[in-house]
Amino acid sequence: SAVISQKPSRDICQRGTSLTIQCQVDSQVTMMFWYRQQPGQSLTLIATANQGSEATYESGFVIDKFPISRPNLTFSTLTVSNMSPEDSSIYLCSVLPTGWDTQYFGPGTRLTVL
Amino acid sequence: GESVGLHLPTLSVQEGDNSIINCAYSNSASDYFIWYKQESGKGPQFIIDIRSNMDKRQGQRVTVLLNKTVKHLSLQIAATQPGDSAVYFCAERMTSYDKVIFGPGTSLSVIP
């Protein structure tokens, strides 16, 4: 398995501002993913972030709103830009360790936008 | 795409009883399935997985059943304990090293 940490664990932000969420893994992984979990709902994939290439976004998510960086094999950031109250969610980082089938998840970042 | 549905289905069971959580998956091309447990304030935790060439797999107190004919997955928890109270998600994946797509989830509540 992989040990994943996220920063911050939670934040309260004002409308119109941006927040960058960090994800750190304790081992090198090729594939990292960012998910959103709105209150009382399931997880929705935002994008796949592979080191050395541009992130691949799912339908309904765009790079201008959710820019992603993947500078190395153990770290990624997700920025939630120009936030509105509808962006209030839990944002989760996930990794697929090389040679494994199972994705593992970080603890999540709970974002509240006022 | 976005998940559909605003409220999670809820299953209440008596402590010590067996629990069965069901899931209908969407894509007949999916070849790998996972059950995750999510406790309040935490990320999803892997419970058990199964590949499409199997129809049953057992772990410690948990069993996953796969029916590809009707695209149905179930998770059975034996002798349910209060610590099993959580939201349970089934997830599916198509081909190796592809993304995992989550089902809607079921909230399990264990009555002491």
Image (cartoon, rainbow, N blue to C red):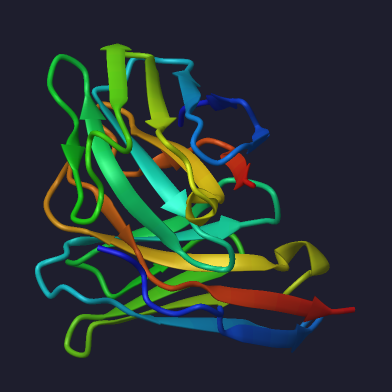
Residue projecting furthest to the front = A16
Residue plotted at (51% across, 78% down): B6
Image coords of residue B75 (percent x, y): 48, 75
Residue plotted at (25% across, 48% down): A61
Task: Please say if A46 is above or below B109.
Answer: above
Residue projecting furthest to the right = B112
Looking at the image, residue B17 sits to the left or right of residue A16; the answer is right
Image coords of residue A110 (percent x, y): 62, 43
| Closer to the camera in the image, A78 or A34 | A78
The image quadrant of residue A94 is: top left
Image coords of residue A31 (percent x, y): 25, 29
Task: Please say if A105 is above or below A74.
Answer: below
Number of callouts: 0
Residue plotted at (49% across, 22% down): A22
Looking at the image, residue B63 sits to the left or right of residue B79; the answer is left
Task: Please say if A113 is above or below A75.
Answer: below
Residue projecting furthest to the bottom = B70
Q: In this orientation, does residue B19 appear?
A: yes
The image quadrant of residue A78 is: top left
Image coords of residue A25 (percent x, y): 46, 20
| Closer to the camera in the image, A58 or B11 | A58
Q: In this orientation, does residue B44 appear?
A: no
Task: Please say if A27 is above or below B33.
Answer: above
Residue plotted at (19% across, 81% down): B68
